[in-house]
Structure formats: C-alpha cells, structure tokens
Image: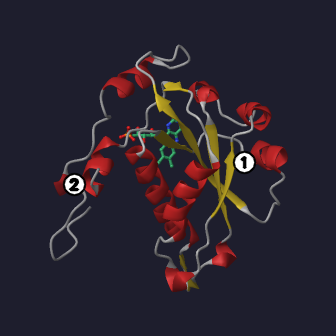
Amino acid sequence: MDVKEAIEKRRAFRSLEPVKITIDLINDLASCAQITASCFNNQPWQYIFVYDPKVLKEMHEALSKGNEWAHKASMIIVIIGKKDDDCVIYDRVYYRFDIGMATEAMILRATELGLVAHPIAGYSPKKTRAVLDIPNDIDVIALVIVGKHSDKINPDMSDKQIKDEKKRPERKAIGDFVFHNEYRGK
Ligand SMILES: Cc1cc2nc3c(=O)[nH]c(=O)nc-3n(C[C@H](O)[C@H](O)[C@H](O)COP(=O)(O)O)c2cc1C
C-alpha cells in the first residue's frame, strides 16, 4: 500500500471485531512513531498500549457516552505527553503537534496492516489516569481505538454513527482551507 492509498483507506470505523494483539504489532506501530519528525528531535510522545482484557474492561469506564462502540476494541492506545518535553518558542507550544504527527504515522501503518485505528477525544482523562496510574503532570491527549473493521453494524452505534460508517463524513472543499500566495480567509 502506498502512502496515498493508506491515507484514503483510513477511516474512523466504529463496527469492530477482535484482532490478535502481539508484541510484534505493538513494536511495528511504535517504530513508526519513533522515526517521526519532532522539534529539535525532542520526541515528546509516549503511548500506553492497553490490551490486557482486564485493563481494557476497566478502560470502558473511562469512555464517554456515545463511545460504547469502543467496548469492542482489542487494544486502546493511550496517547500521553508533556508540554515541557518539547519546544516552547514564545507562545508556540509544539508537543501536541509532534505527538499528533507521530500518532498519524501509527494510524496509517495500522491501516496498511488492515486494522482500524480510530482516535477519540470522548473519554475521561481523570478515569484514564486512575486506571493506568498516569501522574497529573502528564496530559492524556487522546485514545486510539484499535480493532478490525466488521461488516456487521455494532448495535451500540447511533443513527449518525451508522451513516458515517457507510459513507465518509463530508469534508470542506479544498478552496475553503487552501490559499495561494496570500491569506484569503475570513
Ligand atoms: C481528535 C479526534 C477526536 C475524535 N473523537 C471521537 C469520539 O470521541 N468518538 C467517535 O466516535 N469518533 C471520534 N473521532 C472520529 C471523527 O468523528 C472522524 O474522524 C470524523 O468524523 C471523520 O471520519 P473519518 O475519519 O472516517 O474520515 C475523533 C477524531 C479525532 C481526530
């Protein structure tokens, strides 16, 4: 799969079936984050790969209402990081940018491997911290829900989620976010 194909294939699917999680898979994904660019090569990303069924179950308590579909995850990647671990140049704070880039590399690799890797913001950082013993000075930035796409619609999904499952949600037109040679936004 080339990069463009992986970008186009990646979807935030919510109907999941189980997939076998191995150390090789985790290291493969982590190796894609490892070589991502970062400001001053600071490499601010940290990930907790949660795949022990007992801990996964505890993580269900941390998911927001509407994300019950994620109970079918075979793995949840918890993305954590700290502002001080990356460049802060006056008011420009880079850790979330660099961690986002590293995470997208992992998501695209997961896509290439035939997996769903679906980032979510709908969770409680407080409960996530409690389950995984994450100190308060480390931000819980997002979770990535990992599984295999299922043809069977998960009954926990809302009508909107079912609609999005069948067809990628609409995007802005390129002309709405790309400007040529000068800023022409509102
Ligand atoms: C930062 C972030 C947070 C998201 N949070 C949720 C979430 O809590 N629950 C959910 O079902 N999808 C969530 N999504 C998935 C988006 O809804 C999805 O990416 C978007 O609708 C576009 O669909 P597509 O990724 O299949 O193209 C999130 C995506 C991102 C990048």
Q: What residue is disc 2 on?
A: 176
- Local packing at callout 2 (Cα closer than 10 Å; few below 14, some 14-19, many 20+) is few
At numbered mark 1, what does the secondary structure look like: helix, strand or loop? Answer: helix
Asked if disc 2 and disc 1 are in contact, CB closer than 8 Å, the reply is no
Query: What colouring method underlies this structural image?
Result: secondary structure
Residue 73 lies in what quarter of the image? top right
Rendered position, 75 above or below 152: below
* Front residue (pair 81, 117): 117
* Front residue (pair 115, 79): 115
Q: Earlier in the sequence, mark 2 or mark 1?
A: 1
Residue at 49% x, 55% y is: 106
- Left/right of residue 120 with respect to residue 165 in the rendered view: right
- Left/right of residue 65 with respect to residue 36 in the rendered view: right
Discs 2/1, front: 1
- Local packing at callout 1 (Cα closer than 10 Å; few below 14, some 14-19, many 20+) is some
Q: Residue 110: which numbered mark, if any?
A: none
Residue at 49% x, 43% y is: 117
The C terminus sits in image quarter: bottom left
Rendered position, 97 above or below 23: below
Residue at 64% x, 27% y is: 71
- Left/right of residue 54 with respect to residue 18 in the rendered view: right
* Front residue (pair 19, 154): 19
- Left/right of residue 3 with respect to residue 173 in the rendered view: right
Rendered position, 81 above or below 52: below
Amino acid type, mark 1: Pro
Amino acid type, mark 2: Asp
At numbered mark 2, what does the secondary structure look like: helix, strand or loop? Answer: helix
Q: What residue is disc 1 on?
A: 125
Rendered position, 51 above or below 134: above
The location of residue 125, given as percent across then percent down, is 72, 48
